[in-house]
Amino acid sequence: MSKKVRVRFAPSPTGGLHLGGVRTVLYNYLFAKQHGGDFILRIEDTDQSRYVEGAEQYIIDCLNWCGLHPDEGPHVGGEYAPYRQSERKDLYKKYAAQLVKDGYAYYAFDTPEEIEAMREKQRAEGKHTLHYDHHVRYNMRNSLNLMPAETQQLLDAGTPYVIRIKVEPNEVIHFEDMIRGRVEFNTENIDDKVLLKADGMPTYHLAVVVDDHLMKITHAFRGEEWLPSAPVHILLWKYLGWIDDMPEWAHLPLILKPDGNGKLSKRDGDRLGFPVFAMNWTDPKTGELIHGFKELGFLPEAFLNLLAVLGWNDGTEQEIYSLDELIEKFSIERVHHAGAKFDYEKAKWFNHEWIKKLPVSRFTSHVSSLFKEKGITITDEEKFIKVLELVKDRCTLLTDFYEQSVFFFVAPATIDIDSIKPKWNENKQMFFVELIRAYNLLQQWDHNDLENTFKEIAAAHQLKTGELMLPLRIMLVGGKFGPGVFDIASVIGKEETVERIEKTLSELG
Ligand code: GLU
């Protein structure tokens, strides 16, 4: 590759960032970093009717959380600023005018009523697609049919107009997609898309081509849903005289619903109980909160890992990849053509693996804020770290840390006494009374001494340790979970251990 690689993520700020969007970011980022290139964030906000307040900042926050930092963008600037299309409005007008001048586009003055009448006619003719195209354009009110002087008059009078691309029928357009190989389209079925809207804003089609050109984008990776737009973009690259610099394209496969039936939507998340957005997103209009991977307890490392392999593998059995390894091993040619089914259980598995893999210092602040939310302030840092080490293998989500470790700091509010009662007897009661006495006398308070003392007394009472461990666990933890019971006792200390056993004994007794 001779030119410096430059890729872009070009979201429209219309709402929360879907996991498919983050995967697009990731693949762009990996490709850029792998080739020593630049990764650009460009905000495509030319559709004012879909603009949502706060969505741009939210996208930036999501990229920050994931650690996918753009080299250029509206928040960091760069040589090709501005990176917000609404701030580049005047630029696009110039290119739209050039297209008209060169005969590749035309002014269309049709009113909404005239467009509706055109559609009505098409419906009556039994057409499935209601297109403004080469079949109808010569019957409409546009500069292809009007005399030049009439067109000028309308323009001078400030008559609202749009600029449409003039797509010639029956041309075969093709390009080499980096994932799909050769893709062909016949222009027969392509309509004369609007390039410049009545409000003077460009449509996506014009803006994306102009900006990819001006920002010297070399590779454009985007979702498969944009594939049908590719021929219009290719025509624009050609008509604007830039075709030799057109970026290479890769259209990424969809992320599908768990059952494989169609694209995963934010509604599926609500319905099936898993997150679809990267971070929590509150719709500013409805106030509706849609949960994100971050807040539900995913690590960014795991989130990126699970997205990377949702549609790509390196041909080996490896599943766990760090970002650095992905930069080294990712290849766009190995991205699958077919959509990838999203599997939430598998997503959690990745998080679990990453929790086990990372040092606890990576999530101490997250967990202490979980505690704070519940009104518990951690003061003993050393103990906190020890506890996190003890429980981390049991946590699938970061939020699990609360339940898995709170009993180390606060005695359980309730004890699952019903799980002890059925097998409780006088001998066991005697055992625990004796255990308290022996524990009180211990000089050292460590795992081995606690366990040995426990075993000796059990033997003296002719009880199997297995029968006693569960009651002890429930007394200390409140339920049937947690790490090794003597580890728990050694961390919570003598006083607390004895107190918790006594409390349960009195409830049993
Ligand atoms: N603005 C488009 C979107 O919202 C970008 C598509 C592209 O990358 O060309 O996804």
Image (cartoon, rainbow, N blue to C red):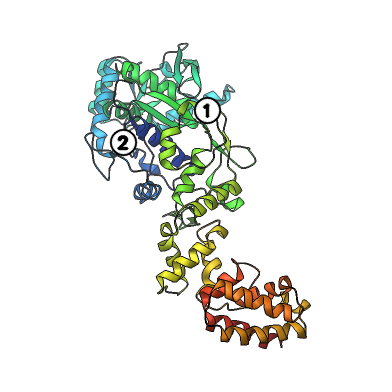
**Residue 415 appears in view:** no
Closer to us: mark 1 or mark 2?
Answer: 2
Q: Which residue is nearer to you in this view: 29 or 81? A: 29
Per the image, the residue denoted by label 2 is: 199
**Quadrant showing the C terminus:** bottom right
Rendered position, 486 above or below 283: below
Rendered-image quarter of ligand 1: top left
**Quadrant showing the N terminus:** top left
Rendered position, 256 above or below 422: above
Q: Which residue is drawn at 78% across and 77% down?
A: 422
Q: Residues within 10 Å of mark 1 (few under 14, many from 20)?
A: some
Q: Where is residue 446 in the image (x, y as percent from the top left)?
A: 53, 74
Q: Which residue is nearer to you in this view: 6 or 475? A: 475
Q: Which residue is drawn at 71% across and 78% down?
A: 458
Q: Residues within 10 Å of mark 2 (few under 14, many from 20)?
A: few
> Mark 2 and mark 1 in contact (Cβ < 8 Å)?
no
Q: Earlier in the sequence, mark 1 or mark 2?
A: 1
In the drawing, what numbered circle is on residue 120? 1
Q: Which amino acid does label 1 sit on?
A: Glu
Q: What residue type is labelled 2?
A: Asp
Q: Which image quadrant for residue 396?
A: bottom right
- Gap in Å between the C-alphas at discs 1 and 2? 25 Å
Q: Which residue is nearer to you in this view: 141 or 509? A: 509
Q: Where is residue 274 in the image (x, y as percent from the top left)?
A: 56, 52
Rendered position, 466 above or below 394: below
Q: Which image quadrant for residue 494?
A: bottom right
